[in-house]
Amino acid sequence: MNNLNQLRVLTNDDWIFPRYRAAVRSFGGGPMSTMITESWNKLFDIGDSMSSSIDEVNRDSLMIQEGGGLGRQLAMAAEMVKADVGVRVIHASLGGFDTREGHRNRHNQLLQQFDAAVEGFLQEIETAGMLDRVLVATTSEFGRRVSENGSGLDHGSASSMLLVGPVRPGRHGEPSPLDDLDGNGNLKITVPLDRYLASLAQEWMGIEAASVLPDSPQPIGLF
């Protein structure tokens, strides 16, 4: 959800919402439609459990004013976390990193949004006294090449992941050397993605990595 008003579907009791809920709850008949109905009912239950209204969100906060779409998503995430409704994983996204042109300016703008959104989110969580219970973990579907292609960078095979929260501070894994690239001009991967995911699953969520990831990857030791 990328718009603060979308939470009204979960939290408001205006005339349209009881009708909307009734329509969704009556939608069924097959495996897929039943799954959709069950998913919406879980969302409705979360909305009913939330103690704060979306109208109470501080729209002048750092994450709203400077965090762009990611900030708006994290504003809603903060409300769900503070309401303690049982949600364990919330996914938010920030697009635009396919910087084949104008990489320098575009990348700076995106990281400024990311910084404002995450900082504002953590401020909300800290005020609620829940900072030791929340971890922000980034992922990306691709990295960037080292060499410029005009004013931009082509897709690359390695990237950097950031963890913010109750994590062991510092750099985990060896940095990929800029003067020792692979045969395609890409950074060499020093920490495989499955080990990163294994750490999030096993070390943070208490789920045995081998039960959810193939080849039993070993956690990195992040916490």
Image (cartoon, rainbow, N blue to C red):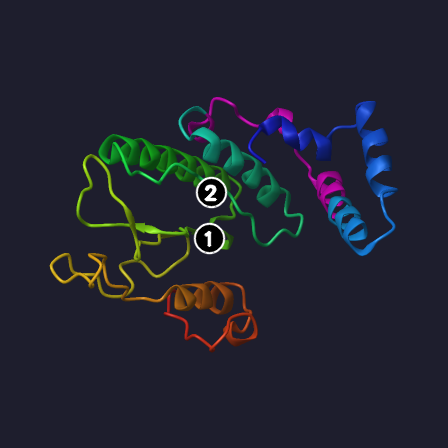
Q: Is residue 112 above or below residue 214?
A: above
Per the model, the C-alpha gap separating discs 2 and 1 is 12 Å
**Label 1 residue SS:** loop
Q: Is residue 131 above or below residue 50?
A: below
At 63% across and 26% down in the image, what residue appears?
5
Range drawn in magenta: 42-64
At 49% across and 51% down in the image, what residue appears?
134
Q: Main secondary structure of the magenta part?
A: helix
The residue at the far left in this view is: 179
Q: Amino acid at mark 1?
A: Leu
Location of residue 10 in the rendering, given as x and y in whole percent from the top left corner: 72, 35
Q: Quadrant of the C terminus?
A: bottom left
**Label 2 residue SS:** helix
Residue at image mark 2: 126
Numbered tag placed on residue 135 in the rendering: 1
Q: Residues within 10 Å of mark 1 (few under 14, many from 20)?
A: some
Q: Specify the quadrant of the image occupied by residue 195.
A: bottom left
Q: Amino acid at mark 2?
A: Glu
